[in-house]
Structure formats: structure tokens, C-alpha cells
Image (tube, rainbow, N blue to C red):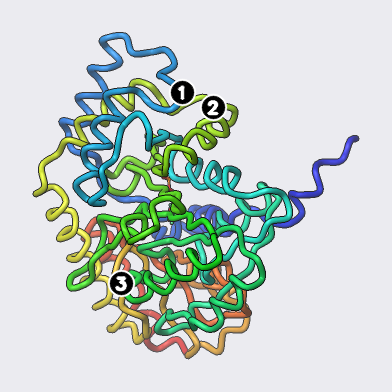
Amino acid sequence: MPKTADRLKGFTESVIREMTRVANHYGAINLSQGFPEADPPEEVVESARRALAEGVHQYAITWGAPRFREALAAKQRHWMGLDLDAEAHLVVTCGSTEAMMVAMMTACNPGDRVIIFSPFYENYGADTILSGAEPIYVPLRPPSYEFDPGELRRAFEQGAKALVLCNPANPSGKVFSEEELKVIATLACEFDTFVITDEVYEHIVYAPHRHRYIAAMPNMFERTISCSSLSKTYAMTGWRLGYVIAAPEVIQAARKVHDFLTVGAAAPLQEGAVTALELPMEYYEDLRLWYTERRDLFLQYLDQAGLPYTIPEGAYYVLADVSRFKVTDDLAFCRWMAKEVGVAAVPGSSFFHEPVHHLVRFHFARKKETLKECGRRLLKLKDAA
Ligand SMILES: Cc1ncc(COP(=O)(O)O)c(C=O)c1O
């Protein structure tokens, strides 16, 4: 039998999806794989139905249906404060997942180095390897998840071609402050490095924190490849709609990668999602409040279970500290918790480059009743240590 490619040896199958299988096996509540337990607004679903009924079945323009791009440019102009042009500055992709792969392949030659903050969303390691680049990890140390500017500078000095910025961050819940973004921006300009952002949680940020787009900072638009998607903002992770925003020269290159990877995102869903992109401003405030309620509720349950955590500033994950259980193998701990407690989480080590084994990640994008039941189950941990 012929051998599969060597590049695949560099990474394993997703631990998150493995934990979903474990959750199903034990009938545990799945707080591992992060998707919202909510539907998109009904008028958005109705729009997609209409697009299908009206015969939108064939390929859209490869870099995005014109109505979708116009609506997206208008929405992002408002939020990013940038004068975006729907023709020049956008590529519509199959989720942020494709956007990140496109960005990486657009920015990097084989052998180039890419800075990744650790802990990181698990796709980045794989994206880097698939595009032939090499990761340089810079730690965000728990429990505050701050980086050391000196350490970051040394990473740039190793000749990094790009830096990946997940903001708000999964799994840490960190929202990078203006000062931190300035440090990153200054180094990126000094070393002529791309910044590839993953901003899928741009609208899930808890007061008093605020999301800032690094692309909108001085001298940054020309070197930032902004990736995001509609998945989390409109509770439509299965629609697979995302995008890349960048300078026209970068977009020209990114469109080529996208065209040969996927041709395009689903045409009828792009038409349907125009309604989502045109939702009024109150939608985003309601979204923030919906998640704030769930975050506050879930943190209260962690308190009751006696698990310390870092308060998430954005996104819908929390890293909880399970050192009280003398954990040396956090994967085994998560399996045990799914079986004995009935709640599935992700072992923290799957997000860290460093040997960190005392954290587990829960997501709280669930209905309040579901979270309440988790709270009840997690009480079993209180006396378990
Ligand atoms: C940081 C981050 N980026 C990207 C994704 C995937 O986004 P999409 O559905 O747009 O591909 C996720 C999903 O959990 C995520 O947490």
C-alpha cells in the first residue's frame, strides 16, 4: 500500500472531537466542542429558504457573491472603522477555518516561521505545517495569559514571516488590550511581518473589555490579513461562511489560493446570510448580553464546585484549574470526568506548546437549563479531591 504524506505526521487528530466521542459514549453533557446551543434569527433562516426556492443553486463568484460582499463590507466598515471596498478588500471563504489556511498559504513560503501564542486554537499548528511553515511558540502564561514583550521580540528576531493573533482568544478568553496590540504592531512593522488574525469572537466580548482590530491601527492594514466568520456571531457554524480582509495586493494572492482550495462558499447560504449582516445594532448588544449571562452563571457553578479559573474577557470558553486533583494526565482526567461526573471538557494540554497539565477547558455557549444541569453535576467534584 502506498504511504500517506509525511507532513501529516506532525499533528494528531483533534482532541476536541475525540472528547465529543467520549461525551457521547458516556452520555455526558458536552462542554468540549464549542458551538452555540442556539439558532440563527428566524428571518435569516427564512432568507436562506427563499434563496433556495428562487433557484440559487450554482457557483457564486469564487471570491464571494456580490450582495454578500457588499453587506459584509458595510458591516465591517462600521465595526473595524476601515474604508473597505467589497471588490478590492475581501475574499469570502468556507468559515474562518479556510480563511486562516488561505492566509497562511498567502503569507508563507515553505520554511518560513510563524509566531503562535500558546495556548492556541488547535488548527494553527496544523495550518502552519500544511503550508510548510514552522511555528515559533510564545507563551501566554496562566493564570493572567500575558506575554513577555522581550520574549515576543526574540521570536520576531528569529525571522518570523507572520504572527497569528486570535483575538478574543480561544481557549484563554483573553482580549488583547490596546497596549498589547501596540507592542505586537510595533514589532510587526519593525520586522516587516504579516499579522494573521482570527477574530471569530469579535462580537463576544464582556464589559468593560472591548475588541480592537489590529488592522485598524496605524500602518497595520497593509500587513494584516484579517480572518473571521459568521459562525459564532449568528450561531451558524454549519453554514461555513467566513472571510479574509486585507490590502488589495494581498487579496489578489489570497483569491488564487481560495479558488483552488474550495472554489467558493455555498451560494444560497451567502444570499441568506445577507439578512444576518444587515441586522440592526441591537442584535450585537443582545448577543453580548446573552453570553454575559451564561458566562456569569457558569462561573458561579465553577465557584460552587471549588474550581479556580481565569475570568474570560471574551469568547465563550473558560480554562479551569484542576491542580487540586493532582492531575498529571489531563486527558485521563477529562475522560474520568465525562464518565463519573457527566460533563465533558477538553484537556488543557491540547492547547499548550508548554507542558501544562493542570487546566481543562469548558465552553458555556449552552442553554441556561443545560448549564444548570452541568452545575449540579460538577458539584460532585467538590468532595472528590
Ligand atoms: C478561534 C477559532 N477560530 C476558528 C474557529 C472555526 O471557525 P469557522 O466555523 O468560521 O471555521 C473556531 C471554532 O471553534 C475557533 O474557536
Q: Which residue is mark 2?
A: 259
- Residue at numbered disc 1: 62
Q: Is residue 313 visible?
A: yes
Q: Amino acid at mark 3?
A: Glu
Dot 2 amino acid type: Asp
How far from the left and from the top, in percent, is residue 153? 55, 77
Q: Which residue is mark 3?
A: 178
Q: Is residue 342 visible?
A: no
In the displayed structure image, the side of residue 227 where residue 127 appears, left or right: right
**Alpha-carbon span between mark 3 and mark 2:** 35 Å
> Residue at the spot x=58%, y=80% of the render?
356
Look at the numbered disc 2 and give the secondary structure of its residue.
helix
Q: Position of residue 350 (x, y in %)?
A: 58, 67
Image height of 272 relative to 345, above or below: above
Q: Are marks 1 and 3 in contact (CB under 8 Å)?
A: no
Rendered residue at 29%/71% (across/down): 313
Q: In the displayed structure, does residue 328 sit left or right of residue 91?
A: right
Residue placed most toward the observer, 385 or 160: 160
